[in-house]
Image: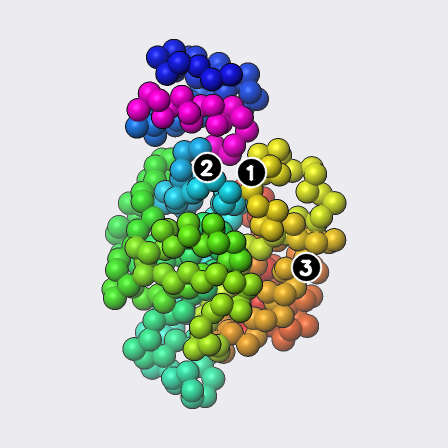
Amino acid sequence: MSVSPLSLTPSAITARLRAAGCVFAEDEAELLTSTARTPADLAVMVDRRVAGLPLEQVLGWAEFCGLRVTLVPGVFVPRRRSEFLAAQAIDLARRTLADGAAGPVPDAGGPAAASGGLAAGRRLVVVDLCCGSGALGAAVAAALSTPAAEERAVDGDMHAGGGRLAETRTADGSPVELHAADLDPVAVRCARRNLAPAGGHVHQGDLYEPLPERLRGRIGVLLASPPYVPTDAIGLLPAEAREHEPLLALDGGADGLDIVRRVIAGAPLWLAPGGHLLVETSERQAANTAEAMARAGLTPRVTHSDELYATVVTGTR
C-alpha cells in the first residue's frame, strides 16, 4: 500500500523494505533517500521496490567496477560477478596495447599479427556482445582511458564503496574503438547512454549480425556475458529477476549454452589474429564451453574467482 511522502522517515522506509523481504533494508533505504529528488519521488521509489522491482532499476543506476551505470526498467542488471569478466578483458586489452606499442604491426589487410591485430595508428577494437546496459564495455573503456595515477584513486574509491559516473576520455583520446550489440531495443537505448561518453557505438541485432563488416578480423578483445541459465532453472531464480528482467537475457536453452555456442562459433571470423574471446559462464559449464572454443579453433583457458564466484572462459585465436 502506498503511503504519504510525509510519513517516509528513514525508519519507516526501512521497516517497509524489511517487511517486503529486503535483506539489506537499511542500506537500501539510505540509497533510495539519497537518490530521490523529492519526497514524492521517494514515495514512488519505495513503492516500486516493495513491489519487487530490482533496486538498481528503481534507483536508475547500478554500481559496476566503480562506475555508476545508468539503468532503466526492463534492462538486465549487471551482476557483481561480471566484474571478474571485465577485469580479465581489461588485463588482456592492456597487454595487447603494450604489445602494439612495442613496434608497428601489419595493417588489417597484411600478414597476421600476434598482438591482437593492433596496427600502427589504429585503436584496439573492443566489442561487448549481449551488452545489456553496456556496463562491461563502459568498464573496459574507462579502465583503458584512465591514467595510472588516476586509476589508483579510482581503485581506492571502489574499495571504499564509492562510484563515479560512467565516463572516459573522448573517443579521439581513447586507445579503444568500442562497439556493443544487443537484440533488445530497450537495452540498446540504455547502452547508448552509457557508452556515448566513451565514443562507443551500440548496434541492435542478433549477436554479430549488426556489427559493421569492417570489423571482421579486427577485434582484439571480444567479451560476452550471454544468457547461460538452463531453461529448467529459470523458475529457481529470484522473483525480481524472473519478473523484471528480460527472459532473453536469462534463458540459455536446455543446458544453458545455446547462445554461448553461437557466440563461440562466430568469433573466429571477427577476431584479429591473436585476438581474445572472453565468455562468462558457470563453473559447471566451463568444460563444455572450453571444448566448444577448441572445436572452433581457439585456444581455451578457464579462470575462476572464488571471491566473486565467477568463471570466465577465454579463447585466443
Q: CA distance from mark 1 to mark 2?
A: 9 Å
Q: Where in the figure is residue 3, as x and y percent of width and height?
A: 44, 14
User: Circle 1 is placed at which residue position?
Assistant: 244
Disc 1 and disc 3 in contact, CB within 8 angstroms: no
**Which disc is residue 57 wearing?**
2
Tag 2, which secondary structure?
helix
Q: Residue at x 45, y 54 (%)?
A: 188
**Which disc is residue 29 wearing?**
none
19 left or right of 121 in image: right
Compare residues 28 and 44 and report the one nearer the observer.
44
User: Circle 3 is placed at which residue position?
Assistant: 258
What span is in magenta? 38-57
Residue 87, visible in the rendered structure? no
Amino acid type of the residue tagged 2 in the rendering: Gln
The quarter of the displayed image where residue 196 is located: bottom left
Amino acid type of the residue tagged 1 in the rendering: His
